[in-house]
Image (spheres, helix red, strand yellow):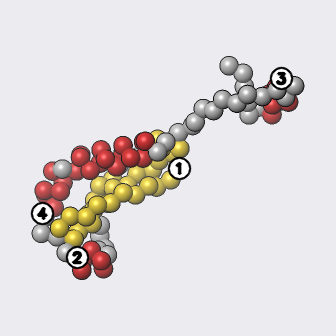
Amino acid sequence: MELLKGYFTVPSDVKDERVIERKLEYIKKYAESYDKEGWGLVSPISFSKQKIPLTDDIRNGRTRWLILAYWDRKPIEQTFEVSDKLVPKLLETGEFYLK
């Protein structure tokens, strides 16, 4: 399980309410990006304004927002061609099975 963070910045003069009104759009993009990379969501998604602004953000007149959640890698099914002689040995380990 990994805590995966996403963030975006908006101009500092944009009101928080305006960002919060559109939070579902930002959360959707965040979730889709990790889902496409093979991650599976295992916790609720958190959305908040960053508490401690970064120097670059202040200098550039921006406010940073965070989106984060815990994710696990989705299992990936792989198919391999193996020699018939190896099958009994592979089945002994318990890591492989026949379909």
Circle 2 — which element? loop
Measuring 87% from the left and 25% from the top, which residue is drawn there? 85
Is 46 situated left or right of 4 in this image? left
Nearer to us of marks 4 and 2 is 2
**Considering only order in the chain, which callout, 2 or 4, is on the residue closer to the N terminus?**
4
Q: Check disc 4 and report the residue beneath it.
A: 15
Residue that label 1 marks: 1
Dots 3, 4 in contact, CB < 8 A: no
Dot 3 amino acid type: Asp
Please state which of the two labelled residues, at mark 3 or mark 2, is closer to the viewer. Answer: 3
Residue found 22% across the figure and 71% down from its top: 62
Q: Residues within 10 Å of mark 4 (few under 14, many from 20)?
A: few
* Type of amino acid under label 1: Met
Residue 91: x %, y % from top left: 80, 27
Say which residue appears at 25% left-offset and 64% top-offset. Answer: 9
Residue type of the residue flagged with mark 2: Asn
The residue that mark 2 highlights is 60
Indicate the quadrant where residue 88 lies: top right
Give the mark nearest the N terminus, 2 or 1: 1
Which one is earlier in the sequence, the residue at label 3 or at label 2?
2
Please determine whether, in this image, residue 58 is positioned above or below residue 99: below
- For marks 4 and 2, give the CA distance: 17 Å
Is disc 1 placed on a helix, strand or loop? loop
Residue annotated with mark 3 = 84
Question: Marks 3 and 2, Cα distance to the nearest angstrom?
Answer: 64 Å
